[in-house]
Amino acid sequence: EADLSSKLPLKGKKILITAGPTYEAIDPVRFIGNHSSGKMGFDIANEAANLGAEVILISGPTHFKVKNSQINLIRVVSAQQMYEACHEFYNDVDVAIAAAAVADYRPKKVAEQKIKKSEASFTIELEKTKDILASLGEIKKNQFLIGFALETENEIENAKLKIQKKNLDLIVLNSLQDEGAGFGKPTNKVTFIDKDFSIEPMELKSKEDVAVDIINKIINHYHA
Ligand code: CTP
Ligand code: CA
């Protein structure tokens, strides 16, 4: 049991966090990726570790490093590797937070040799990756499961659908409406929606402070 009165309210808790982008290979020298820096996931990991949690941080390619010895950083590249690493640890954790910007599609075939520019046009056939978060929701036991949602339209409605589809306890809806928020920015504008669909919009704030808010949600969960 976590000691909630102490300065280390997450002591005794194990938290799995995914972070960063994934890279999906096209050929030996090329990939499909995205602009996620990994900052949000690393900030959550640092905050959780500072409050006493044992953290397993599974990250796609990013330049961030970890300083806290309470964080076990596992570096992966592709969505499939992130999926496998998550399932290796998930049964054993109390909380899982999916902050990674996982590629939704990957090239169906990875060319063994560098693709030459011989054709005038060139098509890459894509197939869906596994939905890591949904797969964790499917086998959820006692884990408190937190996802993110990035939406550009019908934000609240779409986020609620994701809570149901992925069997989440809480979703962090990332709003791109605000110019200061999102990919490559130091700030985020988020709205929390829990599994009972209660909605809590937050102010625009630094990703460090959003991480604090997310960790407070976890602490409150174990208080209740
Ligand atoms: N996610 C995941 N594995 C995937 C895709 C997404 O674990 N293959 C997780 C993300 O880490 C995030 C949540 O699912 O916590 C929602 O991601 P998002 O891209 O907003 O939604 P999708 O379910 O991928 O749907 P879409 O992109 O079509 O909106
Ligand atoms: Ca997606």
Image (tube, rainbow, N blue to C red):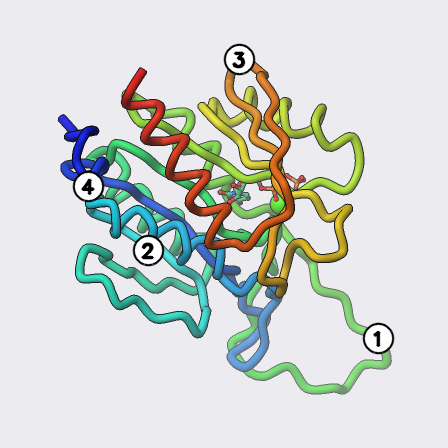
Residue 165 pos. (x, y %) = 56, 23
**Quarter where residue 110 is shown:** bottom right
Q: Is residue 192 above or below residue 21?
A: above
Q: Are marks 2 and 4 in contact (CB under 8 Å)?
A: no
The amino acid type of the residue labelled 4 equals Leu
Residue under label 3, please give it. 196
Q: Residue visible at 46% across and 60% down?
A: 78
Q: Amino acid at mark 2?
A: Asn
- 214 and 151: which one is in front? 214
Q: Amino acid at mark 3?
A: Asp
- Along the polypeptide, which appears first: circle 1 or circle 2? 2
Label 1, label 3: how many angstroms apart (C-alpha)? Answer: 49 Å
Mark-to-mark CA distance, 2 and 4:
13 Å
In terms of depth relative to the viewer, which is nearer, 189 or 197?
189
The residue carrying mark 1 has its beta carbon less than 8 Å from ligand 2: no
Q: Residue at x 64, y 81 (%)?
A: 115
- Drawn side of residue 120 relative to residue 223, left or right: right
Q: Is residue 42 above or below residue 158?
A: below
Crowding at dot 3, Cα within 10 Å, few <14 / some 14-19 / many 20+, comes out as few
Judged from the image, the secondary structure of the residue bearing numbered disc 1 is loop
Q: Quadrant of the C terminus?
A: top left
Q: Helix, strand, or loop for circle 2? A: helix
Quadrant, the N terminus = top left
Residue designated by label 4: 8
Q: CA distance from mark 4 to mark 3?
A: 28 Å
